[in-house]
């Protein structure tokens, strides 16, 4: 199965099992907007809990807030979004499809990297054990040629984006002979800028309504509350403010399911530090956030850092954590050293003094900021695409979502073997015992095998089967999703087994290691 086929199957699976639906589907959907169903919302809530507790609860110097989506319009002037939150877009005249010019070029760059990896893989096969990969990469003529072309194109793209030179971007697309993936032609329009913020009106029109924006990121809600939180919480630098909330971007190219949406959710943390100490903290948060991802156990090779060459107007260092999605390595999280840009600009635009008096150095200054910013929805996609597996069993096959147990929507399914003889009542007793702490379901329909498959398909880590023996000795069978192993245990032991398998503690320990 190709990665593309796998991705299509995953999307269909998400719909069939109540994870993700297209928005307003009975009206044919709304492009790049999705709804989370009964399973999806549980997964999403668990991801948010994992993030919140790893950031706010495990770090004594981080607190959380929940700011409004609507903000004073001047906020977005101060942040630079009104002037510069633009994407360069280009249209193909034949297919009438619209693309982000930088994404077209990045896709071309990724293709060159693939070509290099193919050369290396071929050589590895040819030379076997004696293969010196590093030497081959350095000396092979064909690789050298591809790499030189790639690096030159990358350099030109970074330069054009830095200079905001749209003509140079178009020239680069022409020089690289990039074709439209739909029409296959090079019939491109000029590159234009497009602002990504959604506008709306506040107040009634008769009162003279004002234009406001739906926030394109949650970060600004933190910056404008810096003084409120610092003073009311008597926070001492270094400290952080975290927030989870919706953000909106009028993305030009909506692609890849919930990877790029117009309405999405972010989990952001701004960490305020003494100027001059930002690089130390940048390194700290890079490592901490990578450990948070890796603790999920999808494999360390599924992640990589991508350091930015073109820095945003506010940053003095930036990196992305990329995950190996079915469509390649792509950003799930950004970690940025934002200097004093945001607080400094809000001070300028609001006329307020936004500074911190440092009792250790006896001076006032504008703190520097390290930001960690991750999309909830991209995290959902990461978990689902890593978890989805089709397995051939001895006499059967199954689709199983190997979702890390602490994130699984349903933790335990309690299954009475038959619908009589007091077994459903006993199942209910078990559900009632566990439901205060865990999301537990009970399922009585169909054969036990079919019920196991249904639970595999939604990623339930534990199934508890109640049979006639249970009535006699108060024992049940616990069946584990990943190994399909079964064990006979006492009902009284269930709470500790469920905690051991599905508790978040094991993940947290791996982050703090
Ligand atoms: P991209 O380059 O993919 O457009 P970005 O660099 O603009 O992303 P940031 O502004 O750094 O993204 O936002 C932080 C995080 O928010 C991203 O790492 C991503 O997980 C998430 N995010 C951003 N835009 C979207 C979107 N349109 N849909 C879903 N998640 C998004």
Image: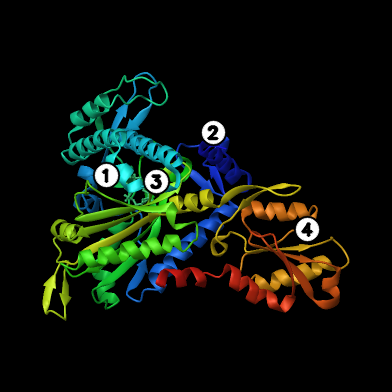
Q: Which residue is mark 3?
A: 131
**Label 3: which secondary element:** loop
Q: Are marks 3 and 2 in contact (CB under 8 Å)?
A: no
Q: Quick one: 3 or 57, which is closer to the camera?
A: 3
Q: Which residue is mark 1?
A: 208
Q: Residues within 10 Å of mark 2 (few under 14, many from 20)?
A: few
Q: Are marks 4 and 2 in contact (CB under 8 Å)?
A: no
Name the side, left or right, on which 343 lies relative to 232: left
Q: Nearer the viewer, mark 1 or mark 4?
A: 4
Residue 260 percent location from the top left of the image: 41, 43
Residue 25 numbered tag: none
Quadrant containing the C terminus is: bottom left
Residue drawn where x is 80% and y is 76% of the image? 474
Q: Nearer the viewer, mark 3 or mark 2?
A: 3
Marks 3 and 2, Cα distance to the nearest angstrom?
54 Å
Residue 355 sits above or below residue 122 on the image: below
**Label 1: which secondary element:** loop
Q: Which residue is mark 2?
A: 28
Q: Which residue is mark 4?
A: 444
Disc with the residue nearer the chain's start (3 vs 1): 3
**Does the rendering let one see residue 437?**
no
Marks 3 and 1, Cα distance to the nearest angstrom?
73 Å
**Residue at the extreme front of the image, as rendered:** 130
Q: Residues within 10 Å of mark 3 (few under 14, many from 20)?
A: some
């Amino acid at each position: 199965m190709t990665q593309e086929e796998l991705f299509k199957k995953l999307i269909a699976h998400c719909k069939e099992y109540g994870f993700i639906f297209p928005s307003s589907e009975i009206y044919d959907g709304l492009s790049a907007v999705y709804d989370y169903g009964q399973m999806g919302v549980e997964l999403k809530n668990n991801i948010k809990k994992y993030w919140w507790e790893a950031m706010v609860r495990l770090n004594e110097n981080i607190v959380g807030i929940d700011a409004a989506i609507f903000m004073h319009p001047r906020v977005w002037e101060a942040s630079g979004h009104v002037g510069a939150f633009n994407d360069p877009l280009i249209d193909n005249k034949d297919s009438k499809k619209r693309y982000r010019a930088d994404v077209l070029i990045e896709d071309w760059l990724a293709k060159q990297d693939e070509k290099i990896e193919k050369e290396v893989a071929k050589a590895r096969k040819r030379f076997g054990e004696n293969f010196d990969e590093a030497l081959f990469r350095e000396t092979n003529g064909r690789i050298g040629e591809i790499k030189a072309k790639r690096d030159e194109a990358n350099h030109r793209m970074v330069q054009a984006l830095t200079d905001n030179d749209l003509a140079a971007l178009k020239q680069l697309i022409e020089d690289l002979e990039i074709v439209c993936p739909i029409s296959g032609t090079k019939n491109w329009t000029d590159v234009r800028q497009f602002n990504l913020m959604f506008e709306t009106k506040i107040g009634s029109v008769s009162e003279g309504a004002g234009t406001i924006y739906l926030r394109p990121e949650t970060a600004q809600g933190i910056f404008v509350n810096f003084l409120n939180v610092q003073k009311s919480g008597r926070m001492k630098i270094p400290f952080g403010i975290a927030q989870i909330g919706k953000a909106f971007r009028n993305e030009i190219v909506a692609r890849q399911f919930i990877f790029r949406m117009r309405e999405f959710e972010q989990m952001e943390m701004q960490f305020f530090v003494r100027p001059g100490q930002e690089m130390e903290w940048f390194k700290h948060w890079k490592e901490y956030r990578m450990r948070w991802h890796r603790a999920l156990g999808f494999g360390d090779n599924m992640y990589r850092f991508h350091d930015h060459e073109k820095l945003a107007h506010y940053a003095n260092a930036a990196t992305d954590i990329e995950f190996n999605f079915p469509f390649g390595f792509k950003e799930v999280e950004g970690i940025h050293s934002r200097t004093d840009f945001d607080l400094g600009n809000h001070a300028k635009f609001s006329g307020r003094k936004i500074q911190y008096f440092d009792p250790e150095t006896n001076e006032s200054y504008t703190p520097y900021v390290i930001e960690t910013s991750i999309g909830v929805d991209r995290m959902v996609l990461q978990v689902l695409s890593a978890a989805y597996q089709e397995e051939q069993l001895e006499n059967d096959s199954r689709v199983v979502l190997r979702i890390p147990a602490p994130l699984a929507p349903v933790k335990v399914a309690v299954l009475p073997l038959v619908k009589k003889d007091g077994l459903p009542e006993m199942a209910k007793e078990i559900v009632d015992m566990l439901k205060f702490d865990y999301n537990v379901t009970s399922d009585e329909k169909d054969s036990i095998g079919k019920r196991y498959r249904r639970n595999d398909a939604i990623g339930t880590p534990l199934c508890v089967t109640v049979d006639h023996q249970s009535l006699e000795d108060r024992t049940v069978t616990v069946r584990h999703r990943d190994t399909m192993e079964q064990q006979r245990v006492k009902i009284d032991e269930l709470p500790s087994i469920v905690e051991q398998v599905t508790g978040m503690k094991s993940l947290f320990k791996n982050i703090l290691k």
